[in-house]
Image (cartoon, rainbow, N blue to C red):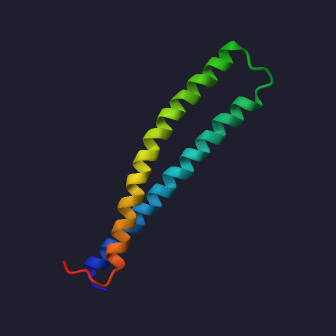
Amino acid sequence: MNLKASFLTFSGLVFLNFALYLIVSHLRSQVALLSFALSSPTLDASGFMRLANGLQSLAVSSLLLTVFTYLLLRFGVSLLLLGCSGRLRL
């Protein structure tokens, strides 16, 4: 495996690891928000509105993160496959 193929393989692995980190950190924030909301003994109107606003912003960030992570995963897999294939002639 030549140096360019090694670099492409390494770059693909970095992109895949970053995408997985984004997914895990986002899931942790969702669990933290829901556990905070469910641990409240009483959920009054202001608490419900805060929860609704938090879930709405979480939904928007989830959509953006999903698109960004999909692109990262796709690009990472492409680089990984390009680097691992033996037909690389750069």
Q: Position of residue 86 (x, y in %)?
A: 31, 85
| Farthest left residue in view | 90
Q: Residue at x 70, y 29 (%)?
A: 37
Q: Is residue 18 above or below residue 51?
A: below
Q: Position of residue 15 (x, y in %)?
A: 40, 61
Question: Is 58 placed left or right of 46 in the picture?
Answer: left
| Quarter of the image that includes the C terminus | bottom left
Task: State the image quarter where residue 43 is shown.
Answer: top right
Q: Nearer the viewer, residue 71 or 29?
A: 71
| Quarter of the image that includes the N terminus | bottom left
Q: Position of residue 4 (x, y in %)?
A: 25, 77
Q: Residue at x 67, y 19 (%)?
A: 48
Q: Residue at x 61, y 21 (%)?
A: 50
Q: Residue at x 74, y 31 (%)?
A: 38
| Farthest right residue in view | 41
Q: Is residue 24 above or below residue 16?
A: above
Question: Is 18 placed left or right of 31 in the picture?
Answer: left
